[in-house]
């Protein structure tokens, strides 16, 4: 922390105070509060501090934003200032809030809370920014009737769009099932080849393991997906097969890497040693409220939708 600045009455000292406040903003990009300024400049009077901050705000060098129940000062982003050029101060504040949300976007409720503006004001500003193609509204899979706002040129995050598993906010269950089947079929074939070509059980087991990259390459070359699937997408599918007891995964060290980069995941198809009992295949076998289920109760076999679906399948 810098030494306390001795405060004088000359205008030059006011400029020194402004420079120090800007330096504090640079040291703490997330913003500074009045408490931080007072701690760094204990000899600065409240009147001088207010004068400096007002000058910095009026000259567009810092922004005043709300974080929770505190007001913070942040260094003005020159790119944001040029993008929102021509807008008033409130419009620039809203633009900056949306920019900070990055590609995850931000709800209009959160914009209202951070900007401390009325709903009518926020709606008007959002329409102006959308008309200027500075921001855009994107529907989120988390809530189909709500929209999040982000900068116009950003690609929405997977947490917003749902990634490859969603189309127009609808979960593509059939597509996921096809991927499950194809991934398992590919690994089953690898295991069969290992059994046919290796005589030693240990060698068979080791040969049946397949890297994530090979599974991803196989699915990509099949051409069954309309979108480009990533290795992370395929890993998600393989994880569901692990939970279903159809695959197992092991992690091995790879050459030329360290940490996570030095580890590779290998997968292989497996056959369960013991078949699942009939009781566990029916809904009652894994029902968390089994002991509260009785005829005439809040949970009963007669009204159980899971039992009905199981009997109809």
Image (spheres, rainbow, N blue to C red):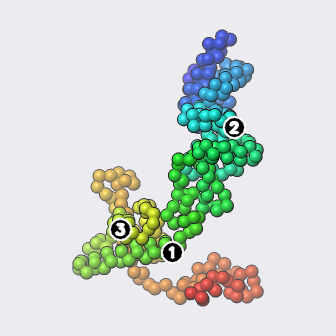
Q: Circle 2 — which element?
A: helix
Q: Label 2, label 3: how many angstroms apart (C-alpha)? A: 51 Å
For this rendering, which residue is in front, 95 or 157? 95
Q: Label 1 neighbourhood size at 10 Å, few (<14), some (14-19), many (20+)?
A: few
Quadrant of the frame with the N terminus: top right
State whether residue 161 is above or below residue 83. Answer: below
Q: Label 3 neighbourhood size at 10 Å, few (<14), some (14-19), many (20+)?
A: few
Q: Residue at x 59, y 64 (%)?
A: 169
Disc 2 + disc 1, Cβ < 8 Å: no
| Earlier sequence position, callout 2 versus callout 1 | 2
User: To which residue does mark 1 refer?
Assistant: 174
Q: Quadrant of residue 91?
A: top right
Q: Label 2, label 1: how many angstroms apart (C-alpha)? A: 47 Å
> Furthest residue to the front?
131
| Earlier sequence position, callout 2 versus callout 3 | 2
Q: Quadrant of residue 210?
A: bottom left
Q: Circle 1 — which element?
A: helix
> Furthest residue to the top?
10
Q: Which mark is residue 221?
A: 3
Q: Residue at x 60, y 88 (%)?
A: 312
Q: Residue at x 67, y 26 (%)?
A: 58
Residue 241 coordinates in the image, percent (x, y): 45, 73
User: To which residue does mark 2 refer?
Assistant: 90
Q: Circle 3 — which element?
A: helix
Residue 54 coordinates in the image, percent (x, y): 69, 25
């Amino acid at each position: 922390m810098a030494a306390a600045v001795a405060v004088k009455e000359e205008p030059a000292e006011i400029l020194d105070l402004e420079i120090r406040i800007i330096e504090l903003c640079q040291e703490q990009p997330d913003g500074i509060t009045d408490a931080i300024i007072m701690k760094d400049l204990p000899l600065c009077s409240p009147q001088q501090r207010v004068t400096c901050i007002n000058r910095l705000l009026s000259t567009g060098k810092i922004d005043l934003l709300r974080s929770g129940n505190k007001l913070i000062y942040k260094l003005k982003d020159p790119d944001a200032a040029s993008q929102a050029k021509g807008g008033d101060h409130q419009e620039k504040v809203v633009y900056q809030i949306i920019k900070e949300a990055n590609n995850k976007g931000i709800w209009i409720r959160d914009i209202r809370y951070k900007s401390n503006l009325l709903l009518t004001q926020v709606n008007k500003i959002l329409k102006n920014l959308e008309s200027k193609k500075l921001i855009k509204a994107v529907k989120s899979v988390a809530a189909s009737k709500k929209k999040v706002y982000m900068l116009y040129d950003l690609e929405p995050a997977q947490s917003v769009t749902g990634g490859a598993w969603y189309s127009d906010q609808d979960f593509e269950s059939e597509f996921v099932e096809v991927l499950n089947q194809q991934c398992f079929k590919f690994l089953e074939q690898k295991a069969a080849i290992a059994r046919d070509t290796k005589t030693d059980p240990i060698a068979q087991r080791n040969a049946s393991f397949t890297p994530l990259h090979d599974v991803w390459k196989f699915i990509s070359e099949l051409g069954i997906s309309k979108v480009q699937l990533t290795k992370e997408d395929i890993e998600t599918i393989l994880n569901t097969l692990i939970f279903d007891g159809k695959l197992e995964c092991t992690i091995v060290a790879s050459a030329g890497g360290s940490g996570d980069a030095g580890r590779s995941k290998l997968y292989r198809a497996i056959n369960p040693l013991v078949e699942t009992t009939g009781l566990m295949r029916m809904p009652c076998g894994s029902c968390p409220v089994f002991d509260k289920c009785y005829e005439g109760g809040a949970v009963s076999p007669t009204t159980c939708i899971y039992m009905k679906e199981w009997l109809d399948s």
